[in-house]
Each structure stands twice: as structure tokens, then as C-alpha cells.
Image (tube, rainbow, N blue to C red):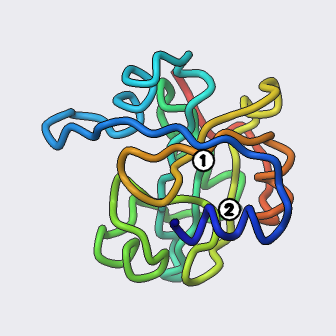
Amino acid sequence: MTPAVNFLKKNKIKFTLHRYQHDADHPSYGLEAAEKLDLDPNLVFKTLVVQIEEKELVVAVVAVNRQLNLKSLARFLKVKKIGMADGKAVESATGYILGGVSPLAQKKRLRTVVDETAAACSTILISGGRRGLEIELGPDDLIRLCSAETGSISSG
């Protein structure tokens, strides 16, 4: 299993795994998961990594049918300069490949912000740590395990 799944087991968190056959040609990892699992895209969340001015990486968790609003995230983090992180830096810091980055059990624990829309859901799905694997869990468990903050960081 992946580090994310093992982490949940170790912490005795209730979760459900969902698997699907990943299509390398699909234009969106997150929307692919929602489509293939026949789920409401408001419940499936993507893990995005941004770089802020001091070269620090920060994780943003946002529903797959919404867009990360970099200006809102910058305001929330109280920084001026923000952008999407380089893929190699993301893989090195998290230990996961792009399209399979989980907010859980990353190699280097990164500051995490979960979009406030997650709070309206009884459960959400996040990447299980590889393409084609999703973890369903309570948003409160995710926030607690990641020591995450919540804020209005998406649009759409």
C-alpha cells in the first residue's frame, strides 16, 4: 500500500479506498477520478502544491471542479509572491508522483490549506498516493492529520 494508506491505518482512521483504471491521456487527474468513480466532483479533491516567496512549498486541497485561486491563497498565507511549484520539487518534497500526490504522509511535511468547501461534506475523496487510487475520509480527519488550515482559496 501507499504511505498515505499506511498512515491512516496506523492512526486508526476510518476510510474507504476507491480504485479506477487511470487513463494517461485524460486531461485532468482529478476530474478523471470523479468521472470514473461516478462521483459528484464537489466531493473529490485535488492536491496542488504552490511555492511562496521564500521558496517554501505549500499544499492546497481543492475540489476538482473548482480552480485554486492563487490571489486568495496568497492573501490567506499573507504573502505577495505565489505560483505553482515545479513538478520535480513537488515529487522530491512529497515522495509522490504528479497526479498521485496525497496530502497525507508526505516525505516532507508541508503546510497545508484545505478549501473551506470541504467542511460542507460528510466525506471527501483525496488522492491515495498513486494515480487510480482515491481515499474517502471525513474532512475533519484530513484537516487534523495534516494540521491543516481552512480558508476560501478556490473559485468556480
Q: Is residue 146 left or right of residue 133?
A: right
Q: Residues within 10 Å of mark 1 (few under 14, many from 20)?
A: many
Q: Residue at x 39, y 20 (%)?
A: 35
Q: Amino acid at mark 2?
A: Thr
Image height check: is 139 above or below 108?
above
Image height check: is 116 above or below 9?
above
Image spot of residue 14 (x, y percent)? 81, 47
Image spot of residue 138 (x, y percent)? 80, 40
**Secondary-structure class at tag 1:** strand
- Residue sitting nearer the eye, 24 or 73: 24
Q: Amino acid at mark 1?
A: Val
* In contact (CB < 8 Å): disc 2 and disc 1: yes
Image height check: is 134 above or below 82?
above
Image height check: is 43 above or below 127?
above
- The Cα–Cα distance between marks 2 and 1, rounded to whole angstroms, is 8 Å
Quadrant of residue 59 in the image? bottom right
Residue furthest to the left in view is 25
Image spot of residue 89 (x, y percent)? 36, 78
**Secondary-structure class at tag 2:** strand
Q: Residue at x 61, y 37 (%)?
A: 125
Task: Indicate which disc, 2 or 1, sits on the residue closer to the N terminus.
Answer: 1
Quadrant of residue 25 in the image? top left
Q: Is residue 6 left or right of residue 31?
A: right
Q: How many marks?
A: 2
- Residue sitting nearer the eye, 38 or 86: 38
Which residue does the numbered mark 1 point to in the structure image?
61
Image spot of residue 91 (x, y percent)? 37, 74
Q: Is residue 108 left or right of residue 35?
A: right
Q: Residue at x 53, y 18 (%)?
A: 39
Q: Residue at x 31, y 70 (%)?
A: 86
Which residue does the numbered mark 2 point to in the structure image?
112
